[in-house]
Image (cartoon, rainbow, N blue to C red):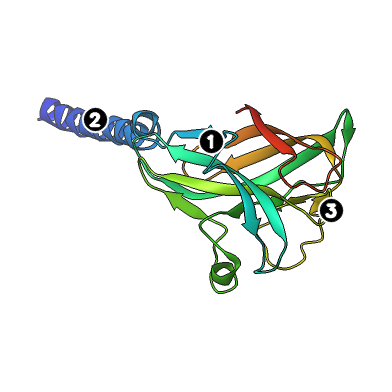
Amino acid sequence: MADETILFGLSIELWALILSVTAIIITLLKDFIIPLFFKPTLEFKYEEKAPFRRENVSINRTPTTGTFLRFSAKNIGRKPALNCRCQILEVKKGQTKYGDYQGFPLRWASRPESIINQTSGERLNIAIGETEFIDLAVTTNQNNLIRLQKYHPVDIGIKEVIEQGKYNILLIFSGDNFKPYKLLFEINRKNSNNPADVTLKLVKF
């Protein structure tokens, strides 16, 4: 009888151990192993041509014309990328940090101000195989400045216009279910009122 009680106790402990190990394995599979194979993977791209670069665009339905520069984010992974957003981390001109741009939120090309004013359009899901565009900068024929394209239609306390010249712009692209990407762009506008006298290059991501 005593032997049976010991065996019964051991079997309970063994089942408890098996259940605990099984729970740990399921958690590891669900939270760590499966996401390694089924996760969003983003590919970023910019080219000096449409649809990345749009020239001779009328702005605010006025005689003002401009050049829009934007880059793409394509989800080439196996899961939708959730609640994506993009911010400027830093702007540099040469070796000099040009203003404090950390936290400057960039605008989705698919979310015009008419939508932003009514809904929360800063975060966006990117489905498997889909491509979304992010507006980075615009130049006009009124001056030789570079206007960074903020998400918020109201003043966020960060200067959005920088002078002509060559800059390195560091961005962070983040979301709920993937590690953030850091993208480095080089933008250069000549001392000219021709809005097409601007170039953009994706240096690395």
Between marks 2 and 3 in the image, the one whose residue lies nearer the viewer: 3
- Residue 154 in the image: above or below residue 18: below
- The residue carrying mark 3 is 143
Q: Residue at x 55, y 54 (%)?
A: 109
Q: Are marks 2 and 3 in contact (CB under 8 Å)?
A: no
Q: Toward the viewer: 86 or 44?
A: 44
- Residue occupying image coordinates x 39% and y 29%: 36
Residue that badge 2 annotates: 18
Q: Residues within 10 Å of mark 1 (few under 14, many from 20)?
A: few
Q: Which mark is residue 179?
A: 1
Mark closer to the observer (3, 1): 3
* Circle 3: element type: loop
Distance between the alpha carbons at the discs numbered 3 and 1 = 39 Å
Q: Nearer the viewer, residue 66 or 102?
A: 66
Q: CA distance from mark 1 to mark 2?
A: 33 Å
Look at the numbered disc 1 and give the secondary structure of its residue.
loop
Q: Position of residue 95 (x, y in %)?
A: 88, 28
Q: Alpha-carbon distance for marks 2 and 3?
A: 72 Å
**Residue type indicated by callout 3:** Asn
Q: Which mark is residue 24?
A: none
Q: Look at discs 1 and 2 and give the one toward the viewer.
A: 1
Q: Classify residue 94 as left or right of residue 56.
A: right
Q: Is residue 44 above or below residue 174?
A: above
Q: Earlier in the sequence, mark 3 or mark 1?
A: 3
Quadrant of the image containing the C terminus: top right
Amino acid type, mark 2: Ile
Residue 47 spot, x, y in % from top left: 57, 33
Q: Which quadrant of the figure has residue 46? A: top right
First in sequence, mark 1 or 2: give its number: 2
Tell me which label, 2 or 3, sits earlier in the chain: 2
Residue at the right extreme, as displayed: 96
Disc 1 marks a residue whose amino acid type is Lys
